[in-house]
C-alpha cells in the first residue's frame, strides 16, 4: 500500500565527542534509501521518490514480495538486507523496520557514515536509544526521530496559537480500531508516544510526573490507556488512547490563561476561544491551517538538516525522552489482565 498515511533538548545530559559533519552541497542530489518498507516505510519511499534534489536509490526489506512491489512502483533498487543497501552508496536512510531492530540497523548505517531518520519510537529501550545518539554524535551524522505528528499542519497551528501563552492544561485523544498488523508493543508505545512528544513540544518542558491507568481489554498488551502528566513548567496534561474505538479520532485541546484552543488532527480544523469577559462571553475564530503532507514536511526537514549539518527538527534526545516517559507509564502500573478482570467481576457479581 502506498497511500498517504524542535523544541529544546530536554533529554539526559550526555558527554559525547562530536565529529564534524560533512556538509553536502546542493550541487548534487542526495542519495537516499529506506530500510523496511511495510506500512510506514513504503510511505517514506513514496515521499522520497517525489522530493526535489533527492534520488531514491533503493529500499531494503527481507519480505522480497513487498520489496519488489515498492521498488517496481517507485523505480528503484530492491535488496533484502541493510548492508547490500548501504553498498549502493547512500547519504541518508529512513529506518522503518520493526522497532526492536532500530538500534542494530541504525548502528550499522551510522558505522558507514550514513545519516539516519529513525521512525518512532526511536528504539525498544532508553539504553538502546542512547546508544544510537552516542554513535551518531561520534560519527558526526544527522539523527532525526520520526515524530511525524509535529509536522501535521493542525498541530503546527496549535503550537503557533499557544506561543507565548501561559499554558494550563492539555488534553489529547488518539483512539481507533486495532491496527491491521499487530506488533509486539501496546497502545502506549505505539500511539501515546506521539502525544507525549506533543506535550513536551507544546510546553517546551519536560514531563516530571506520570499517573497512568492501563488496561488490556482484548489484546495481551495494554489496549486502553488514560495517562496523566505534570510538566516541569506546571502544565497538567492528559492522553486518552485506545484500540477499541470503531473509528479513528485524534484531537487536542489546550487551555491557557487567555485562550482555549481546540484542534482536530484528522479534519485539520483548529479553533480558538479568546477574549474571555467577566460576564462569561468570549470570541471565537477558526485558525488558518496549511495543507502540506506531514511526512513530506518531516522528510524535507530531515534532508535540510543533512545538507546543512544543523540540528534536526526532532533530535535523538527528544525521541529518547518521549520513549522514557512511555516506558515509565508502563512500569508505573501493572496492566489489568482480562482474566483478572473477569474474576474480579465474578467476585463482585
Ligand atoms: N510515525 C508514525 O506515525 C508511524 C506509524 C506506523 C509505524 N511507525 C513505526 O514504523 C516502524 C515500522 O512500523 P510499520 O507499521 O510500518 O511495520 P510493518 O510491519 O508494516 O513494516 C515493517 C517492515 O520491516 C521489514 N523488516 C523486518 N526486518 C527487517 C530488516 N532486518 N531489515 C529491513 N526490513 C525489515 C518487514 O518485512 C516489514 O515489511 C515501527 O518502528 C513503527 O513504530 C511509525
Image (spheres, rainbow, N blue to C red):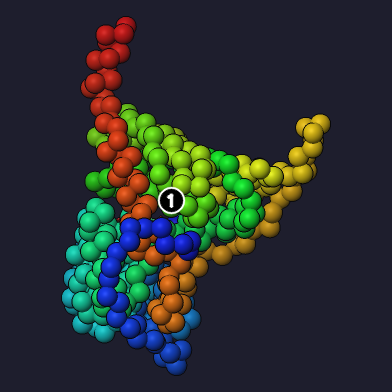
Tell me residue 300's x, y (percent). 47, 73
Residue at image coords 29%, 39%: 330
Q: Quadrant of the C terminus?
A: top left
Q: Quadrant of residue 344?
A: top left
Identify the residue at horizontal 35%, vertical 42% (top origin): 188
Tell me the element at label 1. Answer: loop
- The residue under the point 21% across, 69% down is 107
Q: Tell whether 240 sits left or right of 84.
A: right
Q: Quadrant of ligand 1?
A: bottom left
* Residue positioned 37% across, 31% down in the render: 213
Q: Nearer the viewer, residue 343 or 327?
A: 327
**How far from the left and from the top, in percent, is residue 59?**
28, 72
Residue furthest toward the top? Answer: 349
Asked whether, in this view, residue 289 is left or right of residue 231, the answer is right
Q: Is residue 255 visible?
A: yes
- Residue lying farthest to the right in this orientation: 279
Q: Is residue 314 above or below residue 300?
A: above
Residue 307 x, y percent position in the rendering:
42, 82
Residue in front for this viewpoint, 205 or 283: 205
Does the image show residue 35? Answer: no
Residue 347: name its quadrant: top left
| 91 in relation to 193, above or below | below
Dot 1 crowding, Cα within 10 Å, few <14, some 14–19, many 20+: many
In the picture of the structure, the residue carrying the numbered disc 1 is 206
Amino acid at each position: 500500500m502506498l497511500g498517504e498515511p524542535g523544541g529544546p533538548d530536554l533529554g539526559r545530559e550526555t558527554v559525547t565527542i562530536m565529529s564534524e559533519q560533512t556538509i553536502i552541497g546542493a550541487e548534487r542530489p542526495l542519495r537516499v534509501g529506506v530500510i523496511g518498507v511495510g506500512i510506514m516505510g513504503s510511505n517514506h519511499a513514496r515521499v522520497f521518490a517525489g522530493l526535489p534534489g533527492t534520488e531514491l536509490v533503493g529500499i531494503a526489506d527481507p519480505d522480497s514480495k513487498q520489496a519488489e512491489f515498492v521498488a517496481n512502483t517507485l523505480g528503484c533498487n530492491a535488496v533484502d538486507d541493510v548492508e547490500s543497501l548501504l553498498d549502493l552508496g547512500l547519504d541518508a536512510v529512513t529506518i522503518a523496520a520493526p522497532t526492536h531492530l532500530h538500534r542494530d540497523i541504525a548502528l550499522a548505517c551510522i558505522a558507514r557514515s550514513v545519516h539516519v531518520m529513525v521512525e518512532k519510537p526511536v528504539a525498544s529501550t532508553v539504553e538502546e536509544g542512547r546508544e544510537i545518539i552516542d554513535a551518531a554524535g561520534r560519527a558526526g551524522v544527522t539523527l532525526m526521530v520520526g515524530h511525524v505528528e509535529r509536522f501535521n499542519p493542525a498541530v503546527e497551528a496549535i503550537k503557533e496559537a499557544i506561543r507565548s501563552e501561559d499554558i494550563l492544561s492539555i488534553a489529547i485523544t488518539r483512539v481507533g480500531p486495532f491496527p491491521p498488523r499487530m506488533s509486539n508493543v501496546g497502545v502506549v508505545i505505539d500511539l501515546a508516544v506521539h502525544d507525549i512528544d506533543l506535550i513536551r513540544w507544546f510546553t517546551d518542558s519536560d514531563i516530571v510526573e506520570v499517573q497512568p491507568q492501563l488496561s488490556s481489554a482484548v489484546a495481551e498488551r495494554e489496549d486502553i490507556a488514560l495517562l496523566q502528566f505534570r510538566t516541569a513548567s506546571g502544565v497538567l496534561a492528559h492522553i486518552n488512547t485506545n484500540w477499541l474505538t470503531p473509528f479513528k479520532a485524534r484531537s487536542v485541546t489546550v487551555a491557557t490563561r487567555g485562550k482555549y484552543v481546540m484542534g482536530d488532527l484528522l479534519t485539520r480544523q483548529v479553533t480558538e476561544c479568546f477574549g474571555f469577559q467577566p460576564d462569561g462571553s468570549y470570541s471565537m475564530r477558526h485558525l488558518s491551517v496549511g495543507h502540506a503532507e506531514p511526512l513530506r514536511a518531516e522528510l524535507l526537514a530531515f534532508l535540510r538538516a543533512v545538507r546543512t549539518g544543523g540540528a534536526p527538527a526532532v533530535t535523538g534526545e527528544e525521541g529518547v525522552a518521549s520513549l522514557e516517559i512511555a516506558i515509565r507509564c508502563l512500569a508505573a502500573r501493572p496492566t489489568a489482565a482480562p482474566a483478572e478482570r473477569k474474576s474480579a467481576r465474578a467476585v463482585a457479581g
